[in-house]
Amino acid sequence: MSLVESAAALFREKFKEQPLLFRSPGRVNLIGEHTDYNMGYVLPAAIDKAIYFAMSPRSDRQCNVHAMDMNDEYAFSLDDLRSSKKGWPNYLMGVVDQFVKGKYSIRGFNCVFGGDIPIGAGMSSSAAIEAGLAFALNYIFELRIDALALVKFAQKAENEFVGVQCGIMDQYINIFGEKDKVLRIDCRSLEYKYYPFAFPNISIVLFDTRVSHSLASSEYNRRREECREGVALIKKYYPEVNSLRDVSLEMLQKSKQMMDPTIYRRCKYVVEENDRVLDACRELEKGDLKAFGSYMIKTHAGLSQDYEVSCRELDYLVELVKDNPHVYGSRMMGGGFGGCTINLIETNHIEQTSTTVIEKYKHQFKRDLKTYVTSIGSGTNIIAVNEHATV
Ligand code: GLA
């Protein structure tokens, strides 16, 4: 049985009615890391791994949710939204909270959800839950909220209810993703542009370190703070500056002497990364994936040495492949301190490359690496029932 069929079957068993079905994908990010909350550029894509929701509206204000992967359930009322010690219900309640705060006319619902996005691997399973539920609520209660507003609700759910000060990238790509396309988002204007990304001989391969260092969320919030500090200093010379997006390398040089060296390096990374996204997109337009990948390698160096969000496992994985002629690009992906590297590998060299990387990683860290060959899929959507005749 497929995952969506399992969700539907469990839903029917528990709630004795037919659900509506939704698919909400995970994401990769090709380039543009730690730039979203600095109002910069990112280049993510939705992937083939997803969370599936089986849902139906209720007539009262009760919400019953079953998490398939954890075999756990939770019930709450729209009138009593309080953070739960269990953790996972907060991703859902945070979204409901946004609809309630926005005074949208929603009622309670029944829901079974689950999927195959690995948790903690940096593929944004949390954004998939948040944006997926926002999309589903909008659909089942016929609220006609536009896509960008749903993205913002999902991001706010994470900021306000879960307490992680994430940027907008993950929720944005979840809703706006399209098959075989990467999306360049300008996180200042929120304008976007699709680039075709389907190459018969190149695949996106993730190497999952399977470590998730506890520093991740505290250091994430600290980086945001350091960038803010940098902006405040630069503003003394350039009052028109509101974020690192408004800063050029020349402007940064001018402000350097009044900056703490750490703050300077953080800012330098972000300013350079924004330029790299634009340069990499130019190569993509030309179809030069080798040149595109060379920017990914530079991004990793910046994340590791200047932004300092990498870790030895991630650095080791990039080091292993970066001079391999069949690997066009490699870098850590997402917030950092664990999770995956994203690699562009010639399709007929995936097996050979992965085998070597798995062996060496095991030898070095006494830990099993996981690999995922991903393809680019569409953003969150309703699944037509006839697509799943057995449902
Ligand atoms: C996490 C956050 C995103 C983004 C990345 C780093 O995935 O959720 O908003 O900041 O880290 O690029």
Image (tube, helix red, strand yellow):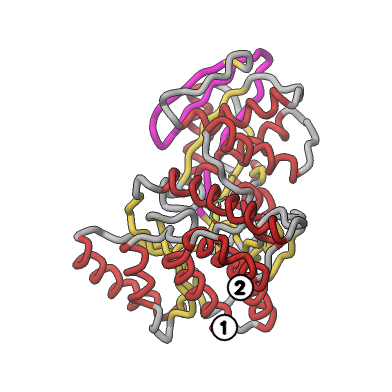
Task: Report, in whole angstroms, how far the alpha carbon at label 2 lies from the one at label 1.
Answer: 11 Å
Q: Which residues are magenta?
A: 49-76
Q: Residue at x 58, y 19 (%)?
A: 81
Up/down of 368 relative to 112, above or below: below
Query: Badge 2 is on which residue?
Result: 276
Q: Residue at x 66, y 50 (%)?
A: 172
Image location (x, y in percent) of residue 36: 62, 55
Give the residue type that dot 1 points to. Answer: Ala
Residue located farthest toward the bottom when viewing the structure as drawn: 325
Badge 2: few (under 14), some or many (20 or more) residues near its Cα, within 10 Å? many
Up/down of 97 relative to 226, above or below: above
Q: Residue at x 57, y 34 (%)?
A: 54
Whichever of labels 2 and 1 marks the residue nearer the N terminus, that label is: 2
Please state which of the two labelled residues, at mark 2 or mark 1, is closer to the viewer: 2
Q: Tell me, for residue 291, which label it has, or none.
A: 1
Q: Residue 140 occupies which quadrant of the picture?
A: top right
Question: Element at badge 1?
Answer: helix
Give the residue type that dot 2 points to. Answer: Arg
